[in-house]
């Protein structure tokens, strides 16, 4: 078991949490004011596109599908109707909103020369009313979170400006702080792992393999810590993320050796929900959340707010599971959907039972050992975050301060 981080990284750690080292190239000065004139920007090459998933119905299973209530009861698995309702979630289907991404830069004003990434929502003239709702919600969320220039999180993607074109398209301009996502990193790591196991990557000394594993563990913990820091900031400002996953965390590097310079940032806030006391229960894009809250027994404003926070924590728990397994397994051994179904469907969120099963597969040993750090601190945290009872899940700040998330397990 790993007892300490690589010697070269010790200077970037201190008891009680991470200490950030500055990036070698400082970003431009931050301003909370948005640029809304398209003349301030220059659009570069097309980077690609992606679609969103939308809520299609309300039934069971947020990720992979639980059997119907009667089916669970007939199987005699020991779940009460109340516990089953707490596991219920929204079904999703492929939506019609397709996002385009472009690179660019600022060409006027004090931020001239700043590199940007444009996120383009289709215009309402083409019937994309849902896209308008998402674009406006993402814009408003960033504006709210960036309202105070002295209280802007380093772990949330920074919005530079926004504008609408003549065709009704909504363009959001974000500072380009990296184009890799946590999902990209996990994929690259698993591919590297496959090369290592196949012998195509040689190790010039017997300690090289162990050192690389330490670097990877350090990188993943910093990634998770940064993502949770961003989520803590959102929750402390009465905003939920509601689409947290490996693709919604953007990284400024995907190299394990650069872990000390890693700054993860949350992005894709189109489904963010305002949980201020006067706003709980409202929102065209959050109907599914409040229906699930009601089904789980949350009837008052305080209970629904607590459910929303716990729902984000559940998503963060699945992110923890994903980042604890995919980067440490060979490509093709484990994928996110299979892992989620294993935890939710096969083991009914009994994380310790899942550990015993996963431990039997030698191909997953590095992932299991990673969560074993600190006498099983990772499994302890994962079980808490994925607790079937939303009332028993920790708040974001408690997750962030957990000994696994702070990185304390690397030196204790």
Image (tube, rainbow, N blue to C red):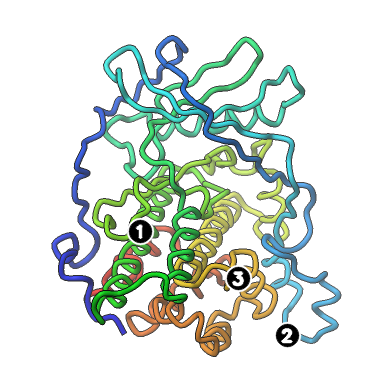
Residue under pointer 2? 78
Q: Which mark is residue 57?
A: none
Report whether 124 appears left or right of 192: right
Quadrant containing the N terminus is: bottom left
Element at badge 1? helix
Residue under pointer 3? 339
Q: Looking at the rendering, which quadrant does residue 110 occupy?
A: top left
Residue under pointer 1? 225
Which is more toward the observer, 125 or 384?
125
From mark 3 to mark 2, how far is it between C-alphas? 23 Å
From mark 2 to mark 1, how far is it between C-alphas? 35 Å
Report whether 51 appears left or right of 278: right
x then y, percent, for residue 370: 39, 76
**Mark 2 burial class by Cα count in 10 Å: few <14, some 14-19, many 20+:** few
Which is more toward the observer, 11 or 332?
332
Element at badge 3? helix
Q: What residue is drawn where x is 19% and y is 45%?
A: 22
Q: Are marks 1 and 3 in contact (CB under 8 Å)?
A: no
x then y, percent, for residue 284: 68, 36
Q: Is residue 242 above or below residue 328?
A: above
Q: Are marks 3 and 2 in contact (CB under 8 Å)?
A: no
Of the residues tagged 3 and 2, which is closer to the observer?
Answer: 3
From mark 1 to mark 3, how far is it between C-alphas? 21 Å
Element at badge 2? loop
* Mark before the other along the chain sequence, 2 or 1: 2
Report whether 143 appears left or right of 56: left
Report whether 364 appears left or right of 256: right
């Amino acid at each position: 078991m790993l007892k300490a981080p690589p010697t070269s990284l010790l200077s970037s750690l201190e008891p009680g949490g991470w200490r950030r080292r500055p990036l070698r190239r400082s970003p431009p000065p931050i301003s909370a004011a948005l640029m809304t004139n398209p003349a301030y920007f220059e659009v570069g090459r097309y980077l690609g596109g992606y679609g969103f998933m939308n809520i299609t119905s309300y039934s069971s299973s947020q990720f992979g599908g639980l059997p119907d209530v009667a089916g669970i009861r007939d199987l005699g698995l020991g779940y009460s109707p109340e516990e089953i309702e707490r596991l219920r979630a929204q079904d999703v289907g492929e939506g019609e909103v397709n996002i385009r991404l472009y690179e660019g830069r600022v060409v006027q004003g004090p931020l001239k020369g700043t590199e940007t990434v444009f996120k383009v929502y289709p215009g309402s003239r083409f019937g994309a009313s849902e896209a308008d709702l998402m674009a406006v919600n993402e814009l408003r969320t960033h504006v709210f979170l960036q309202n105070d220039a002295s209280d802007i999180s380093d772990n949330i993607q920074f919005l530079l400006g926004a504008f609408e074109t003549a065709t009704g398209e909504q363009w959001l301009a974000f500072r380009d702080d990296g184009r890799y996502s946590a999902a990209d990193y996990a994929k690259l790591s698993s591919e590297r792992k496959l090369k290592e196991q196949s012998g195509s990557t040689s190790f010039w000394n017997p300690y090289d393999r162990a050192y690389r594993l330490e670097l990877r563990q350090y990188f993943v913990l910093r990634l998770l810590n940064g993502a949770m820091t961003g989520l803590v900031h959102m929750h402390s400002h009465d905003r939920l993320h509601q689409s947290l996953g490996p693709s919604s965390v953007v990284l400024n590097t995907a190299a394990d050796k650069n872990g000390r310079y890693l700054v993860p940032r949350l992005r894709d806030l189109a489904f963010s929900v305002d949980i201020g006391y006067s706003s709980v229960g409202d929102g065209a894009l959050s109907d599914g959340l409040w229906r699930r809250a009601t089904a789980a027994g949350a009837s008052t404003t305080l209970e629904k707010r607590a459910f929303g926070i716990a729902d984000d924590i559940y998503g963060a728990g699945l992110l923890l599971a994903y980042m604890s397994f995919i980067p440490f397994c060979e490509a093709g051994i484990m994928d996110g959907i299979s892992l989620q179904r294993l935890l939710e469907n096969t083991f009914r969120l009994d994380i310790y039972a899942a550990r015993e099963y996963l431990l039997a597969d030698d191909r997953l040993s590095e992932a299991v050992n990673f969560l074993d750090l600190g006498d099983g601190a990772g499994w302890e945290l994962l079980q808490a975050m994925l607790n079937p009872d939303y009332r028993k899940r920790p708040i974001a700040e408690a997750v962030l301060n957990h000994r696994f998330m702070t990185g304390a397990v690397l030196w204790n």
